[in-house]
Image: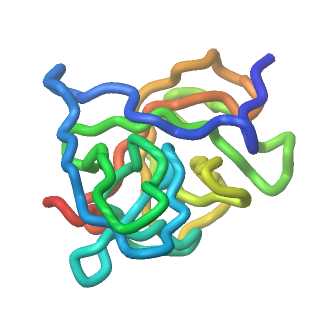
Amino acid sequence: MATYAGTYAPRIGSMMDGTPPVVWNCPIAASQTVKAGDFVVRTNGLVVTCAADGTMTLGIAMEDAPDDEGKILIGVATAQTLFMLPVHHGTPGNAVIEAADTDVTKTYDLSYETLPYWFVDKEGSAGIGVKIHKFVDPLATLNGLVLASIDYDHREVK
């Protein structure tokens, strides 16, 4: 059985319409420690890592930040972008992929405990909303992988 929590940096899994992901080369704020797989947001036009309880995201870093000011490739969260993420719950036995009628299309929180290991938080409800669309791992997989999109209200790009 797969266990990804704390070991799997998320990535773009696919696009719902089959097109290539939207990737932007964005300026990054000075002294940022953004790692590939971190969800990011723009502040004053510069990329920074999202807070665990943030409310908005531009997308996901496709590479580590440069050592100095510069630019970083971002996989932009659009209406079509599906991110591959593990599921997580504070009660380990509840961190499983459940039946399609329980998890698919349900909105959970996007969160992390240690960067860049982001996950779908099945018990959170106050941060960036993520909706599960597909399962990558089989039902009942502990901390299994899913494909999820960022809710409209939590995407910088509408």
User: With 48 as the anchor, is 157 left or right in this view?
Assistant: left
Q: Residue furthest bottom?
A: 44
Which coloring applies here? rainbow
* Number of numbered callouts drawn: 0
Which residue is at the front of the view, 65 or 131?
Answer: 65
At 25% from the left edge and 29% from the top edge, which residue is drawn?
15
Q: Quadrant of residue 138?
A: top right
At 17% from the left edge and 60% from the top edge, which residue is drawn?
157
In the rendered image, the vertical position of residue 106 relative to residue 98, given as above or below = below
Locate residue 119, reporting x and y percent.
Answer: 60, 48
Which residue is at the front of the view, 30 or 92?
Answer: 30
Which quadrant does the N terminus fall into?
A: top right
Locate residue 58, reporting x and y percent.
Answer: 29, 60
At 49% from the left edge and 73% from the top edge, which residue is drawn?
31
User: With 139 as the anchor, is 16 left or right in this view?
Assistant: left
Which quadrant does the C terminus fall into?
A: bottom left
Which residue is at the front of the view, 116 or 87?
Answer: 116
At 50% from the left edge and 45% from the top edge, which residue is drawn?
37
Q: Residue 127, can we see it?
A: no
User: With 116 as the anchor, is 59 left or right in this view?
Assistant: left
Q: Quadrant of residue 17?
A: top left
In the rendered image, the vertical position of residue 2 relative to residue 25, given as above or below = above
Q: Residue 88, can we see it?
A: yes
Locate residue 148, reporting x and y percent.
Answer: 42, 39
Locate residue 85, reporting x and y percent.
Answer: 54, 38
User: With 127 as the anchor, is 30 left or right in this view?
Assistant: left
